[in-house]
Amino acid sequence: MNNGKITTSDCQHENEQHSFRFVAALFEDEPVFVDFSDEENQKVVTLDTDPLVDDDSEEPNAQQEQQQTNGTDESGDIEMTTTQEPSEQQQQQQPKRKKKKIPKHHTIVVSLSSDGNYIFTGTNKGYLNIISATTLETIRSLKVCNSNIKGIEICKNLSKIVINSSDRIARQYKLPPMSDLEYGEFELEHKYQDVVNRLQWNTLKFNHTGEYLCASTLGATHDIYIWETSMGSLIKILEGSNEELIDVDWNYRNVAIVANGMDTGMKI
């Protein structure tokens, strides 16, 4: 798929029939959920981008916006305000502006849980949206940061999630049980950052047990950082690359890490 990042998952259901599903974050377009499990009924569904916002959140609802525009007294009644209407000459002098509808949020990255039941999306305003893969409706939204979310990595055993953002911090959360994902607590366990060199993280990956996390760096250094996830401590820095490492992943069987260089390709 052009200009998109695709995450695939081979999902096993209760009837033990494998289905082929993937989600994609598209460039300058809405994210999509694709289900090819049924050849006769293939689905491509657009996912919602805007997060769920509570009434008491920072974003005002329509009634609050009206009250802010007109003004209210202490009793809650709307106060009448008078404004001077512009003259016909002033109206003719004012340039006509075309109204352009700009979406509040853009989905930058998407990830599908290993069980195939939930879709996690990250927006350009730091919101993590959780979407049910069954109903394709947003069930929960979390404000993670005030910058772009550019990476989401979910542990294979669904115990942890790490969110990479453009503020140079990767945040690791403890996931609630999948049955309580809508109301369970997302506990912030660790923040991974380089306070000295102020490095950006390109890609983050858990190992198959979630005990370790590795990351490729964006910046002057071309290293791979490895942390132990229970305490959040840095245990190893792999050096020696002469080029920027874009992607990184674990080789579970050979206990090795593979990285993709910008110029020369794959390194092990």
Image (cartoon, helix red, strand yellow):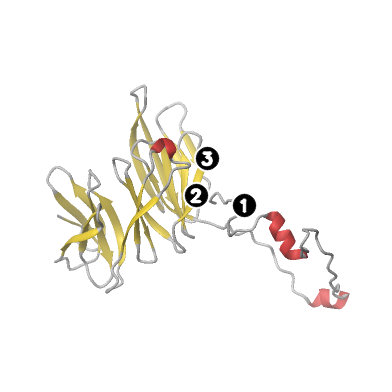
Picture disc at residue 55: 1
Across and down, in percent, residue 38 comes to 42, 27
Residue 75, image quadrant: bottom right
Residue 176, image quadrant: top left
169 to 139, vertically: above or below = below
Say whether disc 1 or disc 2 marks the residue closer to the N-terminus.
1
- Give the amino acid type for the residue marked by disc 3 in the picture: Glu
Q: Residues within 10 Å of mark 1 (few under 14, many from 20)?
A: few
- Give the amino acid type for the residue marked by disc 2 in the picture: Ser
Picture disc at residue 141: 2
Marks 1 and 2, how far apart at CA = 13 Å
Q: Are marks 3 and 2 in contact (CB under 8 Å)?
A: no
Picture disc at residue 137: 3
Which element carries disc 2, helix, strand or loop?
strand
Q: Is residue 250 left or right of residue 173?
A: left
Of residues 64 and 106, the one drawn nearer to the viewer in this rendering: 64
Which element carries disc 1, helix, strand or loop?
loop
